[in-house]
Image: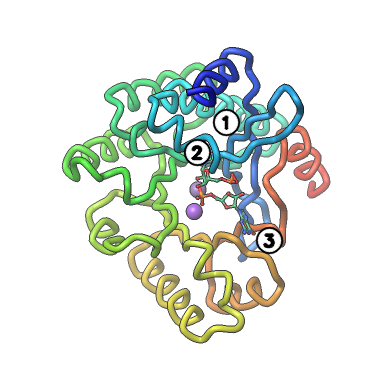
Amino acid sequence: MELEANLRKALEREEFEVFYQPKVELRSDKVVGVEALVRWRRPDSVVVSPDEFIPICEETGLILPLGKWVLEQACSRAKYWHDMGFDGLNVSVNLSPRQFQDNHLVDHVGEILAQTGLAPHCLELEITEGVVMHSVDEAIETMNRLSSMGVRLSLDDFGRGYSSLYYLKRFPMSSLKIDRSFVADIATDPDDASIVNTIISMSRSLNLQVVAEGVETKEQLDFLRSKRCDQMQGYYFSRPLPARELTELLEGLR
Ligand code: G
Ligand code: G
Ligand code: MN
Ligand code: NA
């Protein structure tokens, strides 16, 4: 397949780039973390969204070297921001099912943390319930190993799947991210408002940090604040940005 061959070349030629989207803590209005989101900057300068290439990488196995590269980039960038004085800033990296099932994952994470010097608790791995498609017990074993290294785990796209509550009970998670499809209409749709409200109170009673994704308006933000949601992420505060622009954003907040 031509796209597959191009993606392989892109990895060799270092055409991928990691963007970072800030996560804001609502209690303090501080940027407490960033989510790493990969892009492909083609030789013709067109920036390709991961929605267009992650599924192919997942199918072909290219996700393993690409995912490892993203993890290295994200950890060394976070360490760089810590060294600039933004210590404690967390970095979240998305893991696909295939990456999560890879036997080398835990070793790779350990090696990358050691090489970059990033404190393990500053790395968060975002997974969806899709990671347990094959074996729940194996997935939990992997999560426990990561978690005992100090790495945090987050359940991404919460609410979109059909058995999230079951997983929440069994997985060693430290946070969950409310799927942006629920956040979109919280200010206008009473059903979505009550779903989000319920997810927030449930998270609080389970001692999980709760993050709202896809926040685009002040009305959504006001609602989330009034319900004491922990963190928000979305275009209202910032789009995902290249590392250099994120550095400028952080410096502007000092
Ligand atoms: O910003 P956005 O268009 O970046 O991301 C689209 C989708 O691609 C999201 O579902 C996101 O989780 C996924 N994605 C972005 N970066 C990565 C990555 O590094 N690894 C994996 N597995 N998925 C990613
Ligand atoms: O699937 P995951 O949650 O990992 O990926 C986050 C996706 O959401 C990325 O594609 C990112 O670019 C996108 N995103 C981030 N903030 C917003 C937002 O405010 N609105 C919308 N529509 N998408 C967003
Ligand atoms: Mn995510
Ligand atoms: Na998500």
Q: Is 29 located above or below residue 88 in the figure?
A: below
Spatial distance from mark 3 to mark 1, Cα to Cα? 23 Å
Q: Is 171 located above or below residue 78 in the figure?
A: below
Name the spot of residue 232 as percent of width and height, x first.
59, 61
- What amino acid type should be assigned to the residue bearing mark 3? Asp
Label 3 vs 1, first from the N-terminus: 3
Spatial distance from mark 1 to mark 2, Cα to Cα? 7 Å
**Residue 160 visible:** yes
Q: Would you name the residue on which mark 2 appears? A: 93
Left or right: 168 in relation to 75: left
Q: Would you name the residue on which mark 1 appears? A: 74
User: Element at badge 1?
Assistant: helix
Say which residue appears at 38% left-offset and 31% top-offset. Answer: 59
Label 1 vs 2, first from the N-terminus: 1
Q: Would you name the residue on which mark 3 appears? A: 29
User: Element at badge 3?
Assistant: loop
Name the spot of residue 28 as percent of width and height, x first.
65, 61
Residue closest to the eye, 152 or 223: 223
Classify 10 Å Cα crowding around label 2: few (below 14), some (14-19), many (20 and above). Answer: many
User: Element at badge 2?
Assistant: strand
**Residue 117 visible:** no
